[in-house]
Image (cartoon, helix red, strand yellow):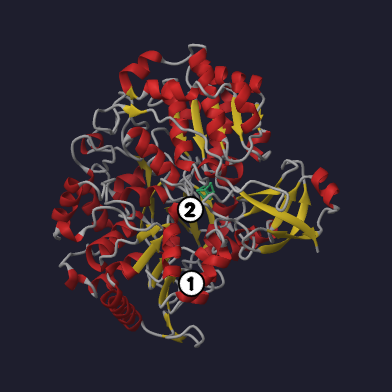
Amino acid sequence: PQKKVKQWKYTTCNYCSTGCAIQIGLDAAGRVVTSRGHAGADVNRGKLCIKGILEHELFDSPGRGAEPLWRDKLHQPWQPVDWDTALDHTAARIKAIQAEHGRDSFAVVSTGQLLTEEFYTLGKLVRGCIGTNNYDGNTTLCMASAVSGYKRSFGADGPPGCYDDFEHTDCLIAFGSNLPEQHPIIYWRLKEARERRRFPMIVVDPRVTMLAQFADIHLPITPGTDCVLINAMLHVIFAEGLEDRAYLQAHTNNLPQLQALVAEYDPQSAQHICGIDEDMIRTVARLYAGAGTAMSIWTMGINQSTHGSDGVANINNLNLVTGNIGKPGGTSLSITGQCNAMGTREWSSCSGLPGYRQLENPEHRRQVADYWGVDPDFFPERRGLTQTDIFPAIETGAIKGLWLVATNPLTSMPNQPRIRKAMEKLDFLVVQDVYEDVETNQYSHVYLPAAVWAEKEGCHTNTERRVNLVRNVVQPYGNAKPDFWIFRKLAERFTGNSGISFAETPEQTFEEMKQLSTGAGRTLDISGMTYANIEAARGIQWPFTQAHAQRPATDPDYLKGEPRLYTDGRFQTPDGKANLIPVRFVNNNECPDDDYPFWLNSGRVVEHFHTRTRTGKIGNCNKFSPTPYMEMNPDAAAEQGVQHQQYVRLTSRRGDAVVMVQLTHRVPRNMVFIPFHFYDCVNRLTLGLLDPYSRQPAFKQSAVRIEAV
Ligand code: SF4
């Protein structure tokens, strides 16, 4: 197809948080024919994974919504309506629900897939116009624990490291992160760095993941016990005097409290809880603390846990104790999930206010209210319900109406039978999505067709705080509209609430956001960025101030932001010191027992993204990964009389699912693994207990039994 290409257009991938720059090839008639990685982009240097290579197939994929649809009752057939009718009806139903049941009886859940300007605009609409406090993003299912842990340790969200740290580190430990399948191009960066400088890599994961296969040391930990392992490592580090005492004294609080707690976690005792041999615990502790620089990365194995926030804080403890924050190769780097999960953290107003401002902080409320021209009293003084608390509130009748923006909870939420019942109770559900056949649309009263990815324009922020530009390459499908357009048009029906105004284009919105990013001591400063310089640099990391922007083209750091945060040891806490947070292990998981003897673990396959809303429409992604399956250990299968490729029924305390078995030694005898992407499968079984700080569900720790069918 490259022979047919007459023009290449720049944009950025819209799946995972790696932030790969893509070129979309168009033929002489302006039709999209292919994609390729952008060789000039620092992130991916011309590479793409299978999802990025095939991403251009999304534009005319099956199931796209071309017109808004309406129905009063779920049993009625859909009626196509024009946009004015759809938005008038939607605004009227929201206002009626709020008038009868109160402002917070209508809830909004968005996604880490939107563009940053769309988050900001939706936040203005929800916080400043509709006025509900029950507003969240599906990032509560993936990154909320990282946000919470960073805030507790460092006083603010924002990953302090970057991919370039792979080039400088002397030791890397990965907790619950399977980069080759989740973030293939970040893995490629790591692999290249290790080929240049053979530093040791330790992988902590109960499953022999692809990343574990490439590691020097694999620690097959008992699910949910990472706090015990890290506490035992810290025990060894303090006992053997391997800590960075000068760094601790200058830059941290709570050292005596942390030392007192980890003194209880000697490796000999810890091994019986976390399943890692005591000598191995000592080995990895010495390796990590003894390295010149060391870095930690993690993903859902930490975040999706009843103690995800504590797990993140404890990883931060490990790095603070060894002096590995804010220096090349020494960092604590959360590998983000969705392409713009970072953007929602920075600008969405879900858990706070734009620019990492806090609802709980009166000065922050005043700053945003002044800038938007609204009464500060219009903002609540604390965040409302998270996505995981909104569905129980639907069950109790506290929430009557819900607007879902590009998220598919019927497939993505734990305990699907319970979510389905909650959906049935809603008086009014709005689904705004690229695809009208998305599963959750079964329960909606209005469907708003959204433009996909490069049919629209705006920014993403990737895992390493790099702001990338998504350029629109083609016009939206049918009569679908960019989410930005939908938010603005709906806002016109609510502005009587506040008199708030909205910029007309994403680029004007970006310029507006920049004004909210400046201020003394703010790390999230994008004031030097423009669409033009972001595109010229193929992405710029924040902070990038006006002073950064004024560097001459001859400067080696021309159009480069700061690769690392906290390089001077000053954190975003009131006294500028990081908080060491003692983390006590509490076993509150649904552990295997006689009735349900297997751990149920879930995760991603490389061909699919989230609930397959998009990748399920791409032929080759489906060819490589067409159906759900269950990994089972051959020894356990022999005990249960189960054969390879046989169908079995899994049952948990929530429901059951039938799935085909793949025998493999990747999983231990007491665990099975199922990809999370498929409808009516693993989340019929998951319990999803919540982390108390982040409200993130423990997707990876449920108990099941298995029967042949
Ligand atoms: Fe897209 Fe992530 Fe693949 Fe890069 S690694 S092409 S950002 S899905």
Q: Amino acid at mark 2?
A: Leu
On screen, residue 130 above or below 155: below
Q: Residue at horizontal 40%, vertical 62%?
A: 109
**In the image, what residue type sits under mark 1?**
Met
> 365 or 12, which is in the foreground?
365
Of residues 560 and 521, which is closer to you in this image? 521
For disc 2, the marked residue is: 141
What is the secondary structure assignment of the residue under circle 1? helix
Q: Position of residue 216 (x, y in %)?
A: 65, 26
Label 2, residues with CA under 10 Å away: few <14, some 14-19, many ≥20: many
Give the quadrant of the N terminus. bottom right
Q: What's the distance in space between the residues labelled 2 and 1, CA to CA? A: 18 Å
Residue contact between numbered discs 2 and 1, judged by CB atoms under 8 Å: no
Number of disc labels: 2
Mark 2: which secondary structure? Answer: helix
Q: Which residue is mark 1?
A: 423
User: In the rendered view, would you say 8 is above or below 60?
Assistant: above
